[in-house]
Image: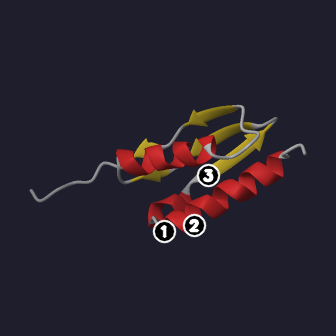
Amino acid sequence: MHTTDIDIELQLRAMFLVMRLPSLEKITVKVEDSLVELGGSVLTYFEKNVCEDCCRRIEGVLSIHNNIHIEKVHGPQ
């Protein structure tokens, strides 16, 4: 069975919801010819890596372009 771009995107979005990390809900996902491009911002490197790891778990993903940025959190001054 061939995995379509829409299948990949839906599976990825479902995985983000299961992770229960609020910042993952804001991640943009674009899939074209089984190439995944992630965008947006998260609070930590852990969350950025979780997004990429989710992509690796989906059958049919050929490449991942992780454009997710880490938000700069300003501490007390």
Secondary structure of the residue carrying tag 3 is: strand
How far apart are the two marked residues, 2 and 3, measured between alpha carbons?
Answer: 13 Å
Reading the chain from its start, which is encountered first: label 2 or label 3? 2
Q: In percent of the image, x 58 and y 49: which residue is there?
A: 54
Quadrant placement of the C terminus: bottom left
Question: Which residue corresponds to mark 1?
Answer: 20
The x, y position of residue 22, in whole percent, is 46, 67
Counting other residues with Cα less than 10 Å from the Cα at mark 1, is it few (<14), some (14-19), or many (20 or more)?
A: few
Q: Earlier in the sequence, mark 1 or mark 3?
A: 1
Are there few (<14), some (14-19), or many (20+) residues within 10 Å of tag 3? some
The kind of secondary structure element at disc 2 is helix
List x then y, in percent, for residue 7.
80, 53
Residue type for callout 1: Arg
> Label 2 amino acid?
Leu
Q: Which residue is mark 2?
A: 17
Residue type (three-letter) at the residue carrying disc 3:
Thr
The answer to which of 52 and 71 lies nearer the viewer is 52
Residue toward you, 54 or 71:
54
As drawn, 34 above or below 15 = above
Where does the image place residue 32, in percent across and percent down from the top left? 79, 38
Which of pointers 1 and 3 indicates the residue nearer the eye?
1
Q: Position of residue 29 (x, y in %)?
A: 66, 49
Q: Quadrant of residue 30?
A: top right
Label ID, residue 71:
none
Q: Quadrant of the N terminus?
A: top right
What's the mark number on residue 28? 3
